[in-house]
Image: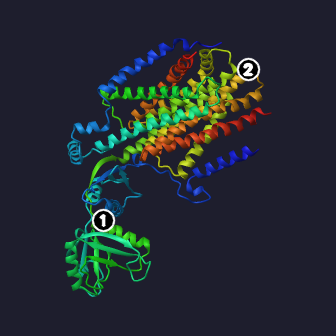
Amino acid sequence: MRSYIIILTVILLAVVLNLPSQYRPFYRDLSLKLGLDLSGGVHLVYQADTSALPDSDRAAAVEATRTNIERRVNSLGVSEPIIQTSKVGSDYRLIVELAGITDINQAISLIGQTAQLEFRATQVATPSSAADFTSIGLTGRDLRLAQVQFNGGKIAGQPVVSLEFSSEGAKKFADITSKSIGQPLAIFLDDRLVTAPTVQSVISDGRAVISGNFTPDEAKKLVIQLNAGALPIPIHIIEQRNIGATLGVESIHKSLVAAAVGLVVIWLFMIVNYGLKGFLADLALVVYILIFLALIKLIPITLTLAGIAGFILSIGMAVDANILIFERMKEELRWGRPLKAAVELGFHRAWTSVRDSNASSLITAGLIFWFGTGSVRGFALTLAVGILVSLFTSITVTRTLLRLIYAR
Amino acid sequence: MHVNFIKYKWLYFGISLLVLIPGVFSLIKYGLRLSITYLLRFKQLDKDQNEKFKSALGKDVVEKRFESVGPVVGAEMAKKALLAVILASLAIILYIAWSFRQIPRPYSPWKFGISAVVALLHDALVVLGLFSLFGHFYQVEIDALFVTALLTVIGFSVHDTIVVFDRVRENLPKMYNKPFPEIVDFSLTETLVRSLNTSLTVILTLTALLLFGGETIRWFVVALLVGIVSGTYSSIFNAAPLLVLWESRKK
């Protein structure tokens, strides 16, 4: 009785999760996440040249560059861009994935620009727009580093942003601050206003502090923006993959046909070889597909072409346990067991081979995940989910169905 | 009643060698055509050249796919893949040795694990060798998907071997007075149909993918297909005879 309840609950859940959102009793975005190779777009890997910076500043510089790229990409209106940093050996890489983008070259040239940080002063008493500020020759090149500090401000524990200028920058900064006490000094990143603190006193040692009612997060965000200009690092493309949107649609279409054909062939194969038992395994296979799709959406796993291939492959593998079990039942019958006992023994005695063979597949899926990146990981995850779900459907679901028929 | 498989073990090893030798020869002589070698030969077809090429073709051309992978990325991938295969092999030996720990002495669970992994490496080598030949004669290139296929094949190869070994494990105490080769022969006969059927379902779905799945993953599917056919062969004709050869030597 308990297994009926579990199975029915799982099936019901899977069906509900697979319904279009307007028919679902609750709302959550459960649309399939498509990888770049299906949605079309561009995948870029940049190598960051950090050789000019000391070791200690490199991670901050790369993070600043990443945030800067993110800001620029957002200005392009790309939906859900992926911008990641990775460290390979001593090299820093930036991985940028832009889905559904059409003008790839525009995006590339925008991303490739180094950030321009500039200090600007104003003559206007109450400046109201960016146009009220004019350049004063102090740029990101003069700024050595920005950092968050917790004890530099007037109130203990309140985060402030400290600026450290180069020796030349310190001279310029001293000159500027002496002329503009009480006035705002604006900082622009790529012609966009970042912040405009008011000059409190003349600073001649090249160490300034921006205080304000920052939360630690705000201070950190400001530091990252400042460092994008202070620690500009050249980046260059080492890998580029463009996938046209039409190819993606084509791929989805073809994969669906392949999946349908594969499924029908497996259905027939099981019925021809195992009769009624095979038909029950086919029903379990439908449950498998429902649960699998629900999980893909729920986790969510980004579906790539390789992932779809993995899914279709897993349809073939999902019935493996059934084959092992049914063959065992045939044997038990041949050895003279009564039908009911043969059904139970089939499950019981095939278990070690089912367990060991699936464990070895899970081990390799785990390793593919561990070593792969991006789409390869998606494939490994698809494979692992497939193996686990198929164990449930081919054993629990099939057994329950078989008992329903053979128990009486 | 059983088929006498083990008697012809040298024939099976011979067939394996016949398939392996050209592949390994090609691997040593030509290596693998990583998707980078293409770019190196053309001085890495860059963005500008790609643009020029497209404009030369005319405006109606819609770019479907443009890939450029630097040599660094390719070398890293190969290194990682090799490490993954080695680790997978070790993990599987450990798992099988653990799972078979209760077999009666003097049989060794380690020999089961290592025999399974030898068969697995055989399959990996068949796929690698064949793709080295494909690379040489048909310009087929190796990419991250290929590595994925290779690792999947490894998982599936053991899948099949375990079906046979599991039966040997079950029959060992039942047939304690029979010689080991006969036990293995008996086990192979009993499990032959399910070994073939489990492979067949995967081969059927892969064939559907090959015929209808489109261009982009064609070679990925071919690698999987070759590996799974090789995996089925090696489970029956390599792993089991190897185990017999090894376990019988000391007596």
Up-down relation of residue B219 to residue A241 (above or below)? above
Where does the image place residue A197, in percent across and percent down from the top left?
32, 80
Where does the image place residue A79, in percent across and percent down from the top left?
40, 58
Q: What residue is pinned by disc 1?
A: A228
Q: Nearer the viewer, mark 1 or mark 2?
A: 1
Q: Between residues B98 and A219, which one lies in front from this camera angle?
A: B98
Query: Based on the displayed image, in which of its 4 quarters is residue A282 positioned?
Result: top right
Tag 2 secondary structure: loop
The reply, left or right, for residue A313 in relation to residue A54 is right
- The crowd level at tag 2 (other Cα within 10 Å; few <14, some 14-19, many 20+) is few
Amino acid, disc 2: Trp
* Residue at 51%, 43% in the rendered image: A382
Amino acid, disc 1: Ala
Same subunit, tags 1 and 2: yes
Question: What is the residue that sits farthest to the right in this orientation?
Answer: A408
Residue B204 can be seen, yes or no = no
- In terms of sequence position, does the residue under pointer 1 or pointer 2 come before the other? 1
Tag 1 secondary structure: helix
Q: What residue is pinned by disc 2?
A: A335
Up-down relation of residue A404 to residue A243 (above or below)? above
The reply, left or right, for residue A400 in relation to residue A139 is right
Determine the chain carrying the residue at label 2.
Answer: A
Where does the image place residue B202, in percent across and percent down from the top left?
52, 30
* Residue at 72%, 47% in the rendered image: A5
